Image (tube, rainbow, N blue to C red):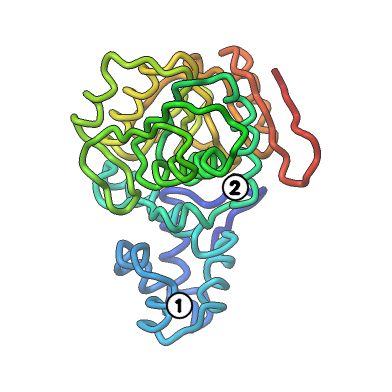
Amino acid sequence: MQQAHDDKPLQGAALWAAVLSAREMMPAKLRTIAAFVAEDPSEFIRMTSREICARLGTSEPTLIRFCRSLGFAGLADFRIELALALAAQSAGAAVHPQAADRRLANPEAKRRIASAALDLLADDRALLIDNGSTVEIVAELLGNSDDHPAMTVMTSGLMVAQHAMRNDRHTVMLTGGVIRPSTGSLTGRLAESSLAGMNFDTFVMGADSIDPEGGLSTYSEDEAHVTRAMVEAASRVIVLADHTKFRGSRLHRICGLSRVAILITDRMPSTEIRAALEAATVRLIVADVTGTDLKDRS
């Protein structure tokens, strides 16, 4: 059975093939989990770990062992990649990674990335913030800080808005639009039109996928439209992406690397990625999760 190697998780068709193989090759307790994933992946992604265990008559340690047998750190990481694989198969229409899973994946790395981003926003007065687990931490840090000057913050993320307004220092606006329950984000034409004619100092952007040739892309058409509008509404784009986001392009392109001013990540990217960033004059900041100083490759 194929597994992930070199910190690169199984993706797409390879992940799905591994799940199907697990139904035949794994021990009985793990085969039961694999069968549920194969037969009803959407339900597996949406249910809590406790609900899955109750339904299958298994334990949470066994559920985690199943995920680790496929090369993932835990349930959240596995379900995020499974959702992306299913979205790719269905042109992005069926299943989306759950916000709760995204928040549980690589939390320490995301906090260091967010902290590094906050340091770059001291001179901004009008800030646009994406929706997503890493940018939520930026908003949390911003909302908890008494030192940062007051600013106007606009976002498409409900949780981002809640964090940013915490200390009553900042003026917080939502883009408007249709709420996507799985992500807590606002999408649709109303979200896009609310950004027209506006000019923000910086857009703090999350990422589903970063590719040397394709730039930044996502599995969701609706989110791609809104994120493009956000990119166009900002003078500077700062992208926050942990090392798992350096993958092949998704179906819906957002922008090329040339539109990005700064990329903050947690591990030094591959030579290919670094060359593409340098060619696009993107400033690279590596917020090392080991606790060492930031490595600024500008």
Kindly identify the amino acid type of the residue bearing the numbered disc 1: Arg
Q: Position of residue 164 (x, y in %)?
A: 46, 40
**Residue that extends furthest to the bottom in the rendered view of this protein:** 57
Q: What label sits on residue 31 in the rendered view?
A: 1
At 35% across and 29% down in the image, what residue appears?
227
Q: Residues within 10 Å of mark 1 (few under 14, many from 20)?
A: some
Picture coordinates of residue 75 (x, y %)? 50, 64
Q: Is residue 159 above or below residue 198?
A: below
Up/down of 54 relative to 139, above or below: below
Image vertical order of residue 186 relative to residue 95, above or below: above
Label 2 amino acid? Lys
Q: CA distance from mark 1 to mark 2?
A: 23 Å
Q: Position of residue 174 (x, y in %)?
A: 31, 35
| Residue contact between numbered discs 1 and 2, judged by CB atoms under 8 Å | no
Task: Judge left or right: residue 242 versus residue 161.
Answer: right
Tell me the residue that label 2 is attached to.
Answer: 8
When asked about the image quadrant of residue 233, the answer is: top left
Q: Residue at x 61, y 45 (%)?
A: 111
Q: x and y percent of residue 1 in the render?
A: 54, 64
